[in-house]
Image (cartoon, rainbow, N blue to C red):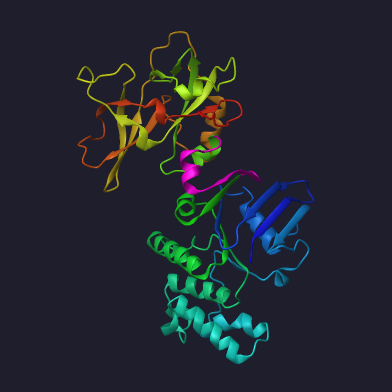
Amino acid sequence: MAEIVLDGIAKRYADGTEALSRTNLTIGDGELFILVGPSGCGKSTLLKLIVGLERPSSGAIRVGGRTVTNLDPKDRNMAMGFQSYAIYPHMSVRENMAFPLKLAKLDSQEIARRVEHAAQILELSELLERKPAALSGGQRQRVAMGRAIVREPAAFLLDEPLSNLDAKLRVQMRTELARLQRRLGTTMVYVTHDQTEAMTLGERIAVLRRGVIQQVGTPRALYLSPANLFVAGFIGSPAMNLLPAAVDGDRLRLPMTDIPLPAGVRGTLPAGTRHLVAGIRPEHVREAAPAGGDGHDSTEFSGRVELLEWLGADLYLHCDVPDRPKDGQAVGREDGLEALRRELDLDAGQTGRPRLVVRIGSDSRVAEGDSIRLCIPPERMLLFDADSGERIDAG
């Protein structure tokens, strides 16, 4: 059993820097759990605290019901993998995989059994006598994993293990890692800054920002029901469109149009709420009928396609959306939203006008420079408090 429990764990350095705020987290036995967030958010620190490479400033760590907070890494029965392969170039694959077992002074028969078993799982049996120089990048990564597997650890802790691989090989290794984890049934904690990698690998994901866990949930929950603006903007590729908005009776004023305030939100807004942030996924923005045609709706608006990305099955349209003429009523506040856009490196609309990313089918004949009609279904929109950034639950 290898359930990992973090009970009030925090990490502060001597200069006062707080790398990780007080954290409570339970990682289930046999779970593939992902820690994701931008560089410097504390995810690698959290991993090092679990394995014992760092000691917490406060709190306790339990693995399989045993408190390991003050134990050295060698006494925690965990295997850790890093970005680099860290395999010895002068040793064969067999010798590399057997090395940690020889250090542990296991007998030769047990070493041979474990190496052969791990090689079979990783499809390395025919490569056991080769040197690392004769292997591909993916094969070297599998050798590094094999050296961890032979130890039969309670948990695998992986710190961006695929970041040195090219794009095609990363996709292949993601699939292999997921398949391997299911086959072994061993708890795996995986750190990445790549949210696509997190979404495709993880059973559950923890999103970190500045040393604080923002949300823990399944990939589906994080995508459809983000807890706050940071999670909404970080999870998803392309990112969620985020727009300043203002409440005006039963209408929601956006920079380019008014739409009905979603019915489920009306009764949950605190009295006097004025400013919000509206979020809409690219696939939920609809291409509407031409202006003046059948089915035209007053909530529709025009957009100009500044950039088109063709991805085979889909088209991503980066649309410049002109502001409506000002009528004296402020649409919303931009200050906090702009800061978030800078933090997440989102397209803030350098023209000074709002921009939307729209995903449509690749059979569309739209071209760069075209004007198109768009609309936003109110029921697909997520709303966030402009001050706290927390999502407003529509019930």
- What segment carries the magenta color? 209-228
Task: State the residue in front, 218 or 384.
Answer: 218
The residue under the point 24% across, 29% down is 370
- Image coordinates of residue 363 in percent, x first then y, are 21, 41
Task: State the residue in front, 353 or 213.
Answer: 213
The residue under the point 56% across, 67% down is 186
Quadrant including the N terminus:
bottom right
The residue under the point 62% across, 52% down is 43
| Snapshot quadrant of residue 282 | top left
Left or right of 272: which side holds 50?
A: right
Task: State the residue in front, 121 or 265.
Answer: 265
Q: Residue furthest bottom?
A: 108
- Image coordinates of residue 360 in percent, x first then y, are 29, 38
The residue under the point 43% across, 25% down is 352
Q: Residue furthest top?
A: 328
Q: Is residue 187 visible?
A: yes
- Image coordinates of residue 95 in percent, x first then y, are 55, 85
Left or right of 248: which side holds 208?
A: right
Depicted 63 relative to depicted 301: above or below:
below
Q: How many marks?
A: 0
